[in-house]
Amino acid sequence: MKPITRTFVIALTAVSCLTLSAANWTQGMKEGKAEFKSISQLAFGPEGILIVADTKAAAITAIATGDTTPGKETKALKVEGINQKIAGLLGTSADQILINDMVVNPISRNAYLAISRGRGPEAVPVLVRVKTGGELEAVSFDKVKFSRGELPDAPVDGVVGEGNRRSNPRQESITDIAFFQDRILIAGLSNEEFASTLRAIPFPFEKVAGGTSVEIFHGAHGRFETRSPVRTFVPFNVGNEPSLIAAYTCTPLVQFPIKELSPGAKIKGKTIAELGNRNRPLDMIVYQKDGKDYLLLANSSRGIMKISTDNIEKAESITKRVEDKGGQSYETIASWTGVDQLDKLDAGHALVVRKGDGDSLNLESMALP
């Protein structure tokens, strides 16, 4: 999310972005203190504007960071014990730090990390910036230009269900975000009967419209589903069709045409791959290598998948039960172990948060496979 973060950028997209001036991108923003109940997902838009998801408040906020000085040539970056260093910066211990997301500013190449200081309902949201030289700083929201919108159909904020199915649906009101052309794309749950929801919000925005309810065929489960949220996604051109490629738990990969995302609509996605059950997708980027496009997907139990996009526009829809894997092919990158978060750093490198020794987490750049 994220080039634009987590976005497959084609020439037409770049041209359309350049037709809007910086003044237009910040239209409607006010100056003051931006407040958050949580900071969960992040994505960069144009002109150093950071999109911040607040799942507890079921809201999104666009912030003009002012971080618009172009970064120099990419150098290898490794910050060992990034969680421990953040804990020291914030005056707490490493076991009280959660890294919810990480994105790279495509202009400056500085990294931004969504942090929870503490655990449970009293956790304090913090945004930490890591400069290209490895220096850390907490980002102040006291005097910034920002715009904020709340989801009108957010799920209930409270524990529901019984036994091991107990959960708070509000924690999945927003599960991933990305900026694409002139829109913010949002995945998560709503309070509708078809709870799995996607949104395409025109940017700049003053409010957030209702979502698009989505239905998918889950190959590992052998059935259609409407309540499972997208875990991570990327915008990607499938042929000439701007699309959203989404990964779900257990792990179907599904295509949705972006043009079909409109408030109140109900659409059915096209399941193009089943990547294996007992697995939770964590983060995904798209990149080019040797003239081909690839998806790179981090997972909880199946490592890093390098997914081919060859003939993806001709992929047959999966509509029957898949015992293990099927559809679009991939390879597992064995050397990329312990990756929780990733984003594209430049054309040849990604920046990742990965497990180090013991409970340590490292922030490091890695050559794209």
Image (cartoon, rainbow, N blue to C red):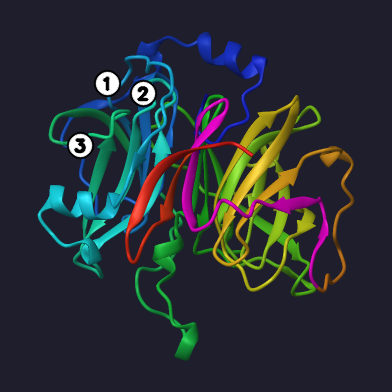
Characterize the local packing of mark 1: few (<14), some (14-19) or many (20 or more) Cα atoms within 10 angstroms: few
Identify the residue at the far left of this view. 91
Q: Earlier in the sequence, mark 1 or mark 3?
A: 1
Q: Which residue is mark 1?
A: 66
Q: Residue 204 vs residue 368: left or right?
A: left
The residues colored magenta run 324-350
Q: Position of residue 215 (x, y in %)?
A: 70, 60
Q: Name the residue rendered at 44%, 58% in the picture.
A: 173
Q: Name the residue rendered at 59%, 36% in the picture.
A: 368
For the residue pair 165 and 324, the one nearer the viewer reads as 324
Q: Earlier in the sequence, mark 2 or mark 1?
A: 2
Mark 1 falls on what kind of element?
loop
Q: Disc number at residue 139?
A: 3
Q: Is residue 37 above or below residue 191?
A: above
Q: Is residue 283 visible?
A: yes
Q: Is residue 329 a member of the stretch shown in magenta?
A: yes
Mark 2 falls on what kind of element?
helix
For the residue pair 22 and 86, the one nearer the viewer reads as 86
Q: Which residue is mark 2?
A: 48
Q: Are marks 2 and 1 in contact (CB under 8 Å)?
A: yes
- The Cα atoms of the two marked residues, 2 and 3, are separated by 14 Å
Q: Earlier in the sequence, mark 2 or mark 3?
A: 2
Characterize the local packing of mark 2: few (<14), some (14-19) or many (20 or more) Cα atoms within 10 angstroms: some
Q: Position of residue 249 (x, y in %)?
A: 61, 65
